[in-house]
Amino acid sequence: MKKKSLLQELITLGLTLMVISVVIGGLVAFVYETTKEQIAMNNAVNADDLAVIMPGTETIEDFAGEFEANEVITEMYRAKSGDEVIGHVYKMTVNGYKPGLTILAGIDKDGNLVAAKVTQSSETPGLGALVAEEAFISQFTGKTTAADFQVVKGTAASENEIVAVSGATISSNAVASAINEAVKFHKQNILGEEVIEEKAPEATIETLLLTGDEMVEIEGEYQTFEVKTAGEVTGYIVITSHAGYYQDMPMTIAVGFDNATKKISNIVVLEQNETKGLGDVIEQEGFQQLFQGKDAQELTVEIYSGASESSKGAFKAVNQAILYYNDVLMQGGN
């Protein structure tokens, strides 16, 4: 038998190596194709973050495509241990004091919050950026979700109250609002619970803290109601609008006036589209209290809970009502 020439041996070796390379390349491609989705998701949710917000997670499964897009929740995953779903993971992106505040939240099978973590932030160092620190974010760990989380200053008095970072109420509210949005979505779409929306505020004698037995709408520049007691006009409710943070989406505010004292009885924000967790604090009772019992004279703007533009817009709306009350209604006109 003739020995193979060196050339033939080299050709044979080359072909063998080529076949091996093709086979290995095919295997690598196959493995990549079958795992790339999980790799992508693992990159989207860091393993260290998962260990905090959903301990025991082995794999995650994207389910965001099963629902309509949500303006706050940007990513949604089922967290699994083996074949068992042990919870759900949500990634939210909101505006804090600056844009791009990203929060992860893990919710267990019972709908309670496992934990939360701030994964991306451009908030002010030493102030808003502190929402990512344990002292703040750990307040959400192991919390039940029967009620929305509310940010407070000082000391928390109930399970759902979260103490704000000092000097960073805007950032603190943004985190709480994002987590509330995830909890609300989870209750409605995963647990199938009916989430009762808060009743829209109304301008009534009771909500404006006035005394009377009837309110009668009268004509005028603004929507206005006389508040009557035994037929006598004892107060007015004036409804005005002014832009807040968004120039094209004005807020609407009802202002109550007590004729006997010439003071503001209360205000009620009837409609607003301010940023969730930020400007919408003007709906809070604390904001109403800035006006209660004040003389019906032009008011100096007070910034409430860091919501500067929303506060300014609300004060301007109230001052419009004050001017109308003094210059028109109390002069016998309408």
Image: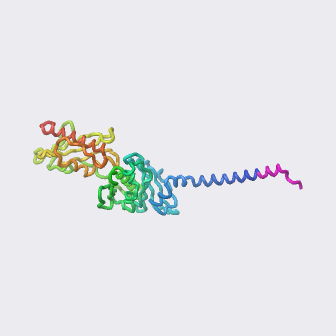
Q: Quadrant of the C terminus?
A: top left
Q: Quadrant of the N terminus?
A: bottom right
| x, y percent for residue 149 | 34, 56
Q: Is residue 270 magenta?
A: no
For the image, the number of numbered tags is 0
* Nearer the observer, 280 or 196: 280
**Magenta-highlighted stretch: main secondary structure?**
helix
255 up-or-down from 82: above or below: above
Residue at point 22%, 42% (across, down): 300
Figure quadrant of residue 253: top left
Residue at point 47%, 58% (across, down): 50
User: Which residue in the rendered view is the most extreme toward the front?
Assistant: 126
Q: Is residue 303 left or right of residue 53?
A: left
| x, y percent for residue 169 | 33, 51
111 up-or-down from 277: above or below: below
| x, y percent for residue 15 | 76, 50
Q: Is residue 143 left or right of residue 207?
A: right
* Nearer the observer, 66 or 289: 289
| x, y percent for residue 2 | 89, 54
Q: Is residue 13 left or right of residue 102?
A: right
| Region of the chain picked out in magenta, as a range | 1-13
